[in-house]
């Protein structure tokens, strides 16, 4: 287990599976999952989960829809509800998720990376101001995925 960025991976194994984790799998991690599925090769398995289960957030659908993406039938779920429990890389987006991932992977050979990502629900104001906070999160995650994962030459081919 390493706390280095994906670009710092020293092994030559291809990246075949990525898990995005946040607190409730309502906003940040499903947004990252949708973006990664659109940006990474089809052969890379991508999932998301929360420390706890939250509720689907309509602002996520709105800001992903602006760039032609959606979360499909995604319903928030917790780590315990994951179908698979092995991932090459776990990317945590909130401190609570990072601590849970480190605990979960204590005896596993998996990279755990923390990408600090703000919680857009902390923004108050008009609908447009709140949507702006969600857009900022979307754009932040898109930049990280593009810069750190999509350029990873070790990603499994599609």
Image (tube, helix red, strand yellow):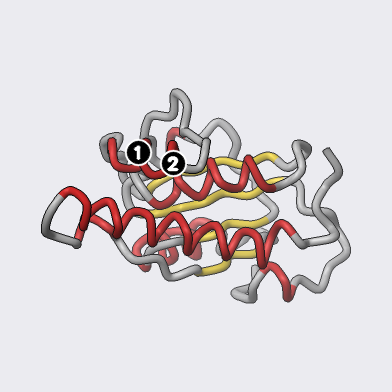
Count how many numbered circles sit on residues in the image.
2
Q: What residue sits right under mark 1 in the picture? A: 62
Question: Element at badge 1?
Answer: helix
Residue 90 as seen in the image, left or right of residue 49: right
Q: Quadrant of the C terminus?
A: top right
Q: Nearer the viewer, residue 149 or 5?
A: 149
Q: What's the residue at 61%, 47% (across, down)? A: 36
CB-based contact (under 8 Å), mark 2 and mark 1: yes
Residue 143 picture location, percent across and down? 57, 64
Query: Which quarter of the picture shows residue 37?
Result: top right
Query: Which quarter of the picture shows residue 61?
Result: top left
Query: Which quarter of the picture shows residue 130?
Result: bottom left
Above or below: residue 34 compared with residue 99:
above
Above or below: residue 21 compared with residue 66:
below
Q: What's the residue at 67%, 66% (across, down)? A: 148
Residue 86 picture location, percent across and down? 64, 45
Residue 131 picture location, percent across and down? 27, 51
Q: Nearer the viewer, residue 60 or 101?
A: 60
Residue 84 as seen in the image, left or right of residue 97: right
Q: Residues within 10 Å of mark 1 (few under 14, many from 20)?
A: some
Residue extending furthest left? Answer: 125
Q: What residue sits right under mark 2 in the picture? A: 66
Residue 42 as seen in the image, left or right of residue 120: right
Q: Residues within 10 Å of mark 2 (few under 14, many from 20)?
A: few
Q: Mark on residue 109?
A: none
Residue 114 picture location, percent across and down? 50, 69
Q: What's the residue at 33%, 54% (across, down)? A: 134
Question: Element at badge 2?
Answer: loop
Above or below: residue 26 compared with residue 116:
above
């Amino acid at each position: 287990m390493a706390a280095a960025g994906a670009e710092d991976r020293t092994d030559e194994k291809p990246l075949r599976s990525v898990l995005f984790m946040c607190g409730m799998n309502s906003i940040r991690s499903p947004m990252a999952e949708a973006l990664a599925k659109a940006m990474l090769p089809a052969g890379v398995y991508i999932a998301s989960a929360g420390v706890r289960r939250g509720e689907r957030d309509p602002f996520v659908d709105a800001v992903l829809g602006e760039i032609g993406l959606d979360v499909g039938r995604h319903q928030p779920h917790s780590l315990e509800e994951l179908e698979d429990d092995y991932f090459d890389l776990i990317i945590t987006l909130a401190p609570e998720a990072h601590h849970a991932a480190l605990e979960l992977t204590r005896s596993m050979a998996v990279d755990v990376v923390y990408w600090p990502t703000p919680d857009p629900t902390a923004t108050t104001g008009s609908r447009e101001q709140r949507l702006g906070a969600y857009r900022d999160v979307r754009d932040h995650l898109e930049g990280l995925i593009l810069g750190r994962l999509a350029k990873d030459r070790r990603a499994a081919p599609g």
